[in-house]
């Protein structure tokens, strides 16, 4: 099983800051890595697919990068509505599908 | 465009339960589908997936041999038959559009509680 490890587990930030969340895979997964945002009492929402592909309707301040084993989700100019838990997810066709443990983002 | 789950409830350990998901607003048989669960206050866990035709399926190790995923493309429906349930299966179960790719759409989920 491929293990995805996110860091940090928790981050408290102020509006307009730039935030970076990382996701490290235990094996090479190419660009089969996706990012989700989950707000309290809501279902997860897809933010970025295949490491860096943007999703229609998602604000442009969200971007993704990386390949292989190391990936990054960047939120530029953070807004209060970005308070949420963020998950990475790998869909490598060779092994079982897994999620990272989640990163909770609080806005000060 | 939505996914609506049904079939959750309280079940005794060892018992069975069948979840269903009704899809609407998109061409159902164009997409692989999955079930993803989330325990109270916990992270996301992929449970099972099925390709567009139903011929290809996959399961998390934690449910392999106990759960069976299936679909009915004629009726735009996805199912999850769950047997030999344990307390560790207690969770909110989401129906999700996607399998070996990004999970683009999520249902609100149906709650499964395994308790005596």
Image (cartoon, coloured by chain):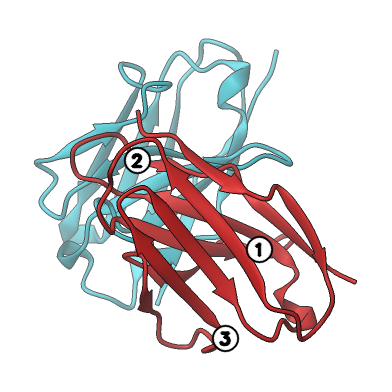
Chain A tint as drawn:
red
**Which badge, 2 or 3, comes first in the chain's sequence?**
3
The residue under label 3 is A61
Give whichever of A74, A87 is nearer the camera. Answer: A74
Residue A2: tell me if it is visible.
yes
Q: Earlier in the sequence, mark 3 or mark 1?
A: 1
Query: Viewed as shown, does residue B10 lie left or right of B68?
Result: right
Residues tagged 2 and 3 counted as in contact (Cβ below 8 A): no
Between disc 2 and disc 3, the foreground one is 3
Q: Is residue B86 above or below residue B81?
A: above
Left or right of residue B25: residue A12: right
Along the line of sight, the residue nearer the viewer: A72 or B43: A72
The outermost residue toward the right is A108
Whether labels 3 and 1 belong to a single chain: the reply is yes
**Mark 3 neighbour density, 10 Å: few (under 14) some (14–19) many (20 or more):** few
Question: Does A10 sit above or below residue A80?
Answer: above
Residue B43, image quadrant:
top right
Chain label for disc 3: A
Q: Is residue B30 above or below residue A87?
A: below
Marks 1 and 2 on same chain: yes
Disc 1/disc 2 C-alpha distance (Å): 22 Å
Task: Give the residue at mark 2.
Answer: A97
Q: Which residue is at 45% across, 71% downward?
A: A64
Q: Colour of chain B?
A: cyan
Provide residue A102's location: percent of width, then percent of height: 62, 49
Q: Which mark is residue A42?
A: 1
Q: Label 2: few (<14), some or many (≥20) within 10 Å? A: many
Q: Position of residue A84 (x, y in %)?
A: 71, 64
Q: Nearer the viewer, residue A83 or B8?
A: A83
Q: Chain of mark 2?
A: A
Nearer the observer, disc 1 or disc 2? 2
Q: Quadrant of residue A39?
A: bottom right
């Amino acid at each position: 099983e491929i293990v995805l490890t996110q860091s940090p587990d928790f981050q408290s930030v102020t509006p307009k800051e730039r935030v970076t969340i990382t996701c490290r895979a235990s094996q090479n997964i190419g660009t089969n890595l996706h990012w989700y945002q989950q707000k309290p009492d809501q279902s997860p929402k897809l933010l970025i697919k295949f490491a860096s592909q943007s999703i229609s309707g998602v604000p442009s301040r969200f971007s993704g990068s990386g390949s292989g084993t190391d990936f990054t989700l960047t939120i530029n100019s953070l807004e209060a509505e970005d308070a949420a838990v963020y998950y990475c997810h790998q869909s490598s066709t060779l092994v079982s599908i897994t999620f990272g443990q989640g990163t909770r983002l609080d806005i000060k | 465009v939505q996914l609506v789950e049904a079939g959750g409830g309280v079940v005794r350990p060892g018992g069975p339960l069948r979840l269903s998901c009704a899809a609407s607003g998109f061409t159902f048989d164009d997409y692989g589908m999955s079930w993803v669960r989330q325990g109270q206050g916990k992270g996301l866990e992929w449970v099972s997936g099925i390709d567009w035709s139903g011929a290809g399926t996959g399961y998390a190790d934690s449910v392999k041999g106990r759960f069976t995923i299936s679909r009915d493309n004629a009726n735009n429906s996805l199912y999850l038959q769950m047997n030999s349930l344990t307390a560790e299966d207690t969770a909110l179960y989401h129906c999700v559009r996607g399998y070996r790719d990004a999970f683009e759409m999520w249902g609100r989920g149906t709650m499964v509680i395994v308790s005596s």
